[in-house]
């Protein structure tokens, strides 16, 4: 019997709380769970509310008004595919199925394409905020078609967190866009949590502060520009006393942290898209290092280092605290800059047309990384939607400039003290690299001259291209001394093949002309190096000999 206006599959912590949230907005809900006793328990605990139980997918479909709207809150991976295989056949064109778990966005794209011919809309939707957010107002990141958004908009806006900028939900983009943005959100969260942990470590070990004292510092920071859910939570956690030992809980918790798929996926796709996310990667590396607890304990008894307070001993305590706050703020900006750059790259690759200002807006409330910093982030992309990186926004640039000196001093003091701050350090390196017009990768490329691989700038197009010439250099002979290849060309010069630009008549007369062409390529190919100072090394034979001699010396 129809009457329910929304369906929820999965009554775990997130599904149960999301169902309660939806029903509290005046929307009758039908619920389904694999273990049917969970359905009975849920209905019993919520008697008198607008809930219906369904023990089969046929019952669930029958209980819902059309177009049916169903959200799955189940583990990512095979359970999603298995559920779709059974659910879609009992639905009708125009119905909408949402995957609210942390699915890999490529899986979401695959599933959306597979379901599309049936007329059913499949939506991958990021849900951030944990169980409290699910119950009282999460940040929601739905992808999928425009038609699916039209069908879902009223309910999703009703259940989402609210800020002065509106409900924390927007249509992110087609197919897997929602889950892509949620993946990057989690990557930024990894980075932010690591940055906070490092700042706490500098206070705790560098300045010798007690957990209660660090709680006071974080509480004060949360009243200013560092205001955020995670800073607020840190202050609360540092005050908790372990009931068994009567010691600060943070000192009793084992210093080993694991990771879930979304953090790892963020760094993987960043590599594929060629986007630098060193702060997020450093956070993952730190978790990996933390897992080596036994090795670290053993190494601490063997490997020495500086005194922990050696970098902080000569500075006023309040000055050091202020500098640590500046470091955390500036590094956090870099964390967001990396994440937003990755979202833009994904949007460009998959033609999602993601509005980054909207992403900043919907992250302002409900989600784990909600922070005051998101206000200037949103304004930056509102002012210039095609902003290549947050660091070049004038307002953001002023914020980093105001924190830069303290940031550098904090990292230097930590290094002097032997206190690891990998996320802060990599964020600073990211910042310095991004503002550097010429990086030392010229030297990374230059040794390729040993094998006569030359990177040249195409002066007519402004693009860079490779021209590879296998000459008489140790180990570089290949199939022939005269083989050349230009990156982007579909035809290569070598053996009996002629360059693309050889006249048609030349192609027909292979013999003499082919031999002359190979000889010319071997002995007198024009080579232009990245730097004029290397030009003399890159001339045929004589230049090769000089370079080899210089290296051998």
Image (tube, helix red, strand yellow):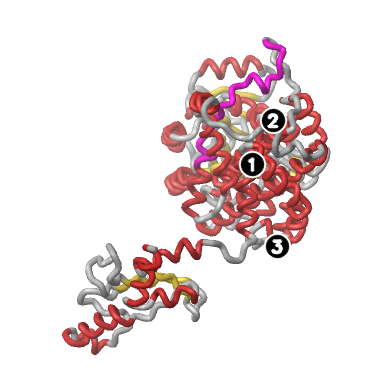
Residue 78 image offset from top left, x and y in percent: 42, 33
Q: Is the residue 512 above or below the residue 394 in the image? A: below
First of labels 1, 3 by sequence position: 3
Instruction: Provide the secondary structure element on which disc 3 rests.
Output: loop
First of labels 1, 2 by sequence position: 2
Instruction: Provide the secondary structure element on which disc 1 rests.
Output: helix
What stretch of residues is rendered in magenta? 245-264
- Which label sits on residue 415? 1
Q: Is the residue 519 above or below the residue 530 in the image? A: below
- Mark 3 vs 2: CB contact within 8 A: no
What is the distance, in whole Å, between disc 1 and disc 2 at their CAs?
A: 13 Å
Is the N terminus in the top left, top right, bottom left or bottom right quadrant?
Answer: top right
* Residue that lies at the very extreme toward the left in this rendered image: 511
Using a 10 Å C-alpha cutoff, classify the residue at mark 1 as few (fewer than 14 neighbours), some (14 to 19) or many (20 or more).
some
Residue 99 appears in the picture as rendered = no
Answer whether residue 256 is magenta in the image.
yes
Using a 10 Å C-alpha cutoff, classify the residue at mark 2 as few (fewer than 14 neighbours), some (14 to 19) or many (20 or more).
some
Residue 439 falls left or right of residue 309: left
* Residue under numbered circle 2: 205
What is the distance, in whole Å, between disc 1 and disc 3 at their CAs?
A: 37 Å
* Residue under numbered circle 3: 384
Residue 117 appears in the picture as rendered = yes
Query: Residue at 28% across / 83% down in the picture?
Result: 520
Which of the two marks, 3 or 2, is nearer to us in this view? 2
Residue 462 image offset from top left, x and y in percent: 52, 75
Using a 10 Å C-alpha cutoff, classify the residue at mark 3 as few (fewer than 14 neighbours), some (14 to 19) or many (20 or more).
few
């Amino acid at each position: 019997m129809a009457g329910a206006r929304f369906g929820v599959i999965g009554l775990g912590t997130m599904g149960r709380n999301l169902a309660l949230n939806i029903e509290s907005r005046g929307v009758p809900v039908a619920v389904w769970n694999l273990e049917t006793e969970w359905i009975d328990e849920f209905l019993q605990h919520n008697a008198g509310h607008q809930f219906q139980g369904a023990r089969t997918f046929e019952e669930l479909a029958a209980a819902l008004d059309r177009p049916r709207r169903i959200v799955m809150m189940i583990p990512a991976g095979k359970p999603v595919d298995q559920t779709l295989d059974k659910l879609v056949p009992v639905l009708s064109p125009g119905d909408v199925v949402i995957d609210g778990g942390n699915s890999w966005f490529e899986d979401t794209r695959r599933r959306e394409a597979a379901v599309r011919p049936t007329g059913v809309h499949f939506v991958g939707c990021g849900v951030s905020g944990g169980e409290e957010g699910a119950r009282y107002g999460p940040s929601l990141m739905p992808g999928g078609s425009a038609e699916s958004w039209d069908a879902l908009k009223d309910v999703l806006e009703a259940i989402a967190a609210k800020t002065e900028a509106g409900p924390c939900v927007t249509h992110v983009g087609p197919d897997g866009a929602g889950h892509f943005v949620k993946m990057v959100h989690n990557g930024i969260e990894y980075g932010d949590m690591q940055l906070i942990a490092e700042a706490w470590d500098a206070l705790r070990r560098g300045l010798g502060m007690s957990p209660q004292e660090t709680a006071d510092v974080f509480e004060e920071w949360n009243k200013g520009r560092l205001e955020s859910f995670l800073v607020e939570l840190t202050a609360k956690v540092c005050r908790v006393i372990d009931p068994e030992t009567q010691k600060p809980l943070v000192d009793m918790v084992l210093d080993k942290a694991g990771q879930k798929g979304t953090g790892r996926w963020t760094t993987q796709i960043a590599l594929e898209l060629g986007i630098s996310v060193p702060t997020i990667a450093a956070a993952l590396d730190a978790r990996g290092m933390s897992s080596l607890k036994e090795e670290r304990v053993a190494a601490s008894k063997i490997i020495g280092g500086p005194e922990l307070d050696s970098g902080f001993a000569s500075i006023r305590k309040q000055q050091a605290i202020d500098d640590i706050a500046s470091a955390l703020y500036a590094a956090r900006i870099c964390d967001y800059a990396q994440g937003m750059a990755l979202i833009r790259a994904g949007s460009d690759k998959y033609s999602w047309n993601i509005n980054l200002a909207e992403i900043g807006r919907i992250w302002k409330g409900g989600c784990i990384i909600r922070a005051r910093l998101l206000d200037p982030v949103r304004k930056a992309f509102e002012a210039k939607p095609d902003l290549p990186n947050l660091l070049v926004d004038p307002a953001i640039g002023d914020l980093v400039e105001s924190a830069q000196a303290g940031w550098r001093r904090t990292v230097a003091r930590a290094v002097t003290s032997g206190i690891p701050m990998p996320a802060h350090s990599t964020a600073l390196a990211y910042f310095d690299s991004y503002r550097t017009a010429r990086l030392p990768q010229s030297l990374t490329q230059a040794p390729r001259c040993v094998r006569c691989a030359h990177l040249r700038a195409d002066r007519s197009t402004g693009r860079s291209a490779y021209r590879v010439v296998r000459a008489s250099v140790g180990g570089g002979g290949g199939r022939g001394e005269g083989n050349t290849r230009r990156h982007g060309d579909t035809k290569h010069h070598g053996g009996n093949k002629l360059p693309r630009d050889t006249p048609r008549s030349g192609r027909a007369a292979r013999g003499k002309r082919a031999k002359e062409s190979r000889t010319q390529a071997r002995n007198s190919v024009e080579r232009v190096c990245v730097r004029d100072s290397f030009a003399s090394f890159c001339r045929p034979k004589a230049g090769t000999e000089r370079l080899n001699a210089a290296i051998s010396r």
